[in-house]
């Protein structure tokens, strides 16, 4: 993802600057120019980049830098704040309430991923116990209703649409009325994709909005449209009261900077991002954790949420215990593969840790291949359990896998030697990631009781692996990070403590 590269470039520019013996105006300018180039490359609108540069220059006091204060932190903090300001329009989006009917209308350009996103949004809420329903008011694109119907059926979500009726306003109103009677609490209206030049379609969208009176209009935007996002988003906002943005295809080679432009144009917050074609590749968007991840500073609250989501509750403490020991065995890999097949990549979890970028983890857009590969690896590991088993699966020493063992595993599982070696390479790669968590301290009961209060940085520093603490920038960096993340909200939850 290009956004990960953006984060890397910014971090490197700051690092280079802080390595300079004397920090003067020139060195600061060079650093900011580098950051500007990175932002422009990521398709952030020029005007936004210029504003950001001016703001940083106003905030960062060159005297402070020269006096040897922690330069890296001062600049990083300023950039962090500026990126957050860009992404945060300052007012939250309408939040539907479970059990109370809300109508959400989706608008966007053709092919932006609107129909897919409607289903993802419905599915996300359905998993949380809502009663969503989908209405297809796209009469423009042939096949739109079939697509929605197919998605909805797969997710077992009720839907409404027509093959014969050509008036989208009529369909939208009928659909909304039907689902109101059925006490659905989230009625999602999908509309035709349109382009800002298509005046008639814009008028139709306005009419659908007027007739259904949605509580929220969501502008769906493909992250790869880059700079064009600003004009497009503005055109939609001028026709209907857009109240939130969802950015799709954040998994591809998208430049992502368009998201910043869309927020600026609609003055509406991004509420979710789409990270793949699958139904559950959909994430809640929070500004601070997002920017924090972008700058390689980690996302602790996301990390703990993912642990809860991906790993079954009764296995969470055990997983964290193993993480703290840092010894990654083939058996742990096997168990993680089981979670992956059930829930989606554990790589998502690791991408939330400071110093990791999503690009070094599971490749996106190749889910089917990845799944098949995982199943192959598991068959090979199964064949290991058949011969002399646990010692090998439970060893964290890859050297015990000598040539004859590799051949036996290949024979036993009916796979090529090359494939067994590939599996062992994957194991080594994951073991390296895993080892970074070595030293993670599982909190005591007393710590657990602290969950209701906010955890302080000092406490956190005792719990974190030393290597990771160093990566964050020591105690100072940690304090800063926790401040930025909203005083370390409920950090204890991530250690599997308490009742969450
Ligand atoms: N990789 C990736 N693909 C996505 C994502 N969201 C949607 N897509 C794909 O984008 C393509 C277009 O999605 P649709 O949902 O058909 O788009 P639409 O906006 O409803 O299209 P119109 O009805 O023409 O407006 C499909 O192939 C989707 O699978 C995402 O987050 N990541």
Image (cartoon, rainbow, N blue to C red):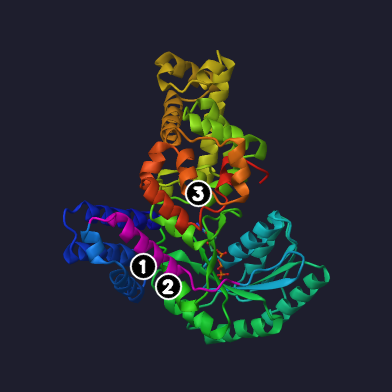
Q: Nearer the viewer, residue 45 or 484?
A: 484
Q: Nearer the viewer, residue 94 or 24?
A: 24
Local secondary structure at mark 3: loop
- Dot placed on the residue nearer the N-terminal end, 1 or 2: 1
Q: Nearer the viewer, residue 458 or 265?
A: 458
Q: Is residue 172 magenta?
A: no
Q: Residue at x 52, y 46 (%)?
A: 367
The numbered disc on residue 43 is 1
- CA distance for labels 1 and 3: 38 Å
- CA distance for labels 1 and 2: 9 Å
Q: Residue at x 19, y 66 (%)?
A: 25
- Label 3: few (<14), some (14–19) or many (≥20) C-alpha neighbours in 10 Å: some
- Label 2: few (<14), some (14–19) or many (≥20) C-alpha neighbours in 10 Å: many
Q: Which residue is mark 2?
A: 261
Local secondary structure at mark 2: helix
Is 12 on the left or on the right of 273, as rendered? Answer: left
The numbered disc on residue 85 is none
Q: Residue at x 41, y 41 (%)?
A: 468
- Dot placed on the residue nearer the N-terminal end, 3 or 2: 2
Region in magenta: 68-93
- Dot placed on the residue nearer the N-terminal end, 1 or 3: 1
Counting every numbered tag in the picture gives: 3
Q: Quadrant of ligand 1?
A: bottom right
Q: Which mark is nearer the camera, 1 or 3?
A: 3
Q: Which residue is mark 3?
A: 456
Q: What is the quadrant of residue 313 in the picture?
A: top right
The answer to whether 452 is drawn above or below residue 205 in the figure is above
């Amino acid at each position: 993802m290009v956004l990960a590269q953006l984060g890397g470039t910014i971090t490197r520019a700051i690092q280079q600057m802080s390595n300079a013996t004397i920090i003067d105006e020139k060195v600061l300018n060079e650093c900011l120019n580098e950051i500007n180039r990175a932002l422009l490359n990521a398709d952030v609108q020029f005007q936004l980049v210029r504003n950001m540069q001016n703001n940083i220059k106003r905030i960062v006091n060159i005297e402070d830098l020269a006096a040897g204060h922690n330069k890296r932190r001062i600049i990083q903090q300023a950039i962090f704040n500026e990126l957050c300001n860009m992404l945060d329009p300052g007012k939250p989006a309408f939040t539907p309430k479970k059990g109370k009917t809300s109508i959400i209308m989706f608008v966007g350009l053709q092919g932006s991923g609107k129909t897919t996103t409607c289903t993802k949004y419905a599915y996300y809420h359905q998993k949380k116990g809502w009663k969503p329903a989908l209405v297809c008011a796209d009469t423009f694109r042939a096949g739109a209703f079939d697509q929605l119907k197919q998605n909805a059926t797969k997710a077992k979500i009720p839907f409404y649409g027509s093959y014969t009726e050509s008036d989208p306003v009529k369909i939208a109103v009928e659909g909304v009325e039907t689902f109101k009677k059925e006490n659905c609490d989230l009625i999602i209206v999908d509309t035709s994709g349109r382009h800002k030049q298509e005046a008639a379609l814009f008028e139709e969208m306005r009419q659908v909005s007027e007739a259904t009176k949605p509580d929220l209009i969501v502008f769906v935007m493909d992250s790869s449209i880059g700079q064009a996002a600003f004009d497009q988003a503005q055109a939609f906002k001028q026709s209907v009261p857009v109240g939130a943005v969802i950015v799709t295809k954040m998994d591809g080679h998208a430049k992502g900077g368009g998201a910043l432009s869309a927020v600026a144009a609609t003055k509406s917050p991004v509420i979710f991002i789409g990270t793949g074609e699958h139904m559950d590749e959909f994430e809640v968007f929070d500004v601070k954790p997002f920017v924090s991840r972008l700058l390689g500073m980690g996302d602790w609250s996301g990390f703990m949420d993912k642990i809860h989501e991906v790993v079954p509750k009764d296995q969470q403490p055990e997983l964290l215990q193993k993480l703290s020991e840092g010894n990654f065995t083939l058996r742990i890999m096997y168990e993680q593969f089981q979670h992956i097949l059930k829930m989606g990549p554990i790589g998502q979890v690791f991408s939330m840790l400071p110093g990791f970028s999503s690009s070094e983890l599971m490749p996106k857009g190749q889910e089917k291949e990845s799944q098949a590969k995982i199943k192959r690896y598991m068959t090979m590991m199964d064949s290991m359990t058949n011969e002399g088993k646990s010692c090998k699966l439970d060893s964290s020493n890859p050297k015990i896998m000598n040539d004859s063992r590799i051949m036996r595993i290949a024979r036993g599982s009916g796979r090529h030697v090359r494939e067994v070696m590939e599996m062992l390479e994957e194991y080594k790669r994951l073991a390296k990631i895993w080892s970074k968590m070595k030293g993670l301290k599982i909190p005591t009961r007393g710590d657990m009781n602290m969950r209701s209060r906010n955890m302080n940085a000092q406490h956190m520093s005792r719990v974190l692996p030393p290597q990771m603490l160093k990566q964050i920038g020591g105690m100072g960096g940690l304090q800063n990070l926790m401040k930025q993340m909203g005083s370390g909200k409920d950090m204890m939850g991530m250690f599997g403590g308490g009742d969450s």
